[in-house]
Amino acid sequence: MPVPGEEGWEQALVSRVVLDHFEVLLWEVSRNGKVLGHLFGTYHLSFGDDRFERPMTLARAALAGSKAVAFELDLAEPGLSEAIGQVMAAPNGPYLDRLLGAELFDQVLPLLESRGIPRSAARFLKPWVVGTILAFPEAQEGPMMD
């Protein structure tokens, strides 16, 4: 996708709406005329703010046709950590050790424990969560590089 300043970058911009002092951007990511996805520019709003109805309508239309969606979350947001925990865990089953079987669970458990997840907690994780956790390398000592 062209970047601002390159020839043709304006064509990648699906919607640019200036609302008072807010600028909302919905970018279309495409290659050779085929739409690969959308990038919705970050902005912060209060729930129910009418000034965002038009850009949200455009965003909903783009999201409705998506196979996958990713969001940036502020984990400091009150209640968010609890909500995430609720979708990651199966407190009433089915439990991971039963879903994976004893042999596979015993192979996965040391990998989870090396990432700070004890057996007592690992048992309640949903399989997709385990896959996500194991997809990332273990934390390293030293300064964090961003």
Image (cartoon, rainbow, N blue to C red):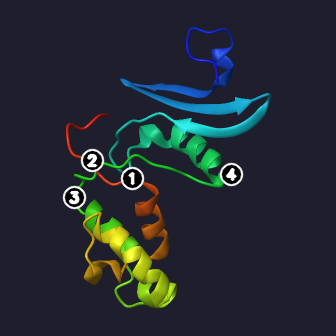
Q: Amino acid at mark 3?
A: Pro
Q: Is residue 17 left or right of residue 33?
A: left
The residue pinned by badge 3 equals 78
Q: Nearer the viewer, mark 1 or mark 3?
A: 1
The residue pinned by badge 1 equals 137
Image coordinates for residue 141, horizontal then vertical, percent: 21, 45
User: Quick check: 143 above or below 22?
Assistant: below
Image coordinates for residue 119, horizontal then vertical, percent: 29, 81
Q: Amino acid at mark 1?
A: Pro
C-alpha gap between disc 2 and disc 4: 38 Å
In the image, 141 versus 82, the foreground residue is 141
Q: Which of disc 3 and disc 4 is earlier in sequence?
A: 4
Q: Are marks 4 and 3 in contact (CB under 8 Å)?
A: no
Q: Which of disc 1 and disc 4 is earlier in sequence?
A: 4
Q: Which mark is residue 140?
A: 2
Q: Are marks 1 and 2 in contact (CB under 8 Å)?
A: yes
At a point 34% along the width and 39% down the height, the residue shown is 44
Q: Which of disc 4 and disc 2 is earlier in sequence?
A: 4
Q: Which of disc 3 and disc 2 is earlier in sequence?
A: 3
C-alpha gap between disc 1 and disc 2: 9 Å
Q: For residue 138, which quarter of the picture?
A: bottom left
C-alpha gap between disc 4 and disc 1: 32 Å
The residue pinned by badge 4 equals 65
* Mark 1 residue crowding within 10 angstroms, few (<14) / some (14–19) / many (20+): few
* Mark 3 residue crowding within 10 angstroms, few (<14) / some (14–19) / many (20+): few
Q: Are marks 1 and 3 in contact (CB under 8 Å)?
A: no
Image quadrant holding the N terminus, namely top right
Q: Amino acid at mark 4?
A: Gly
At a point 51% along the width and 29% down the height, the residue shown is 25
Q: Amino acid at mark 2?
A: Gln
Image quadrant holding the C terminus, namely top left
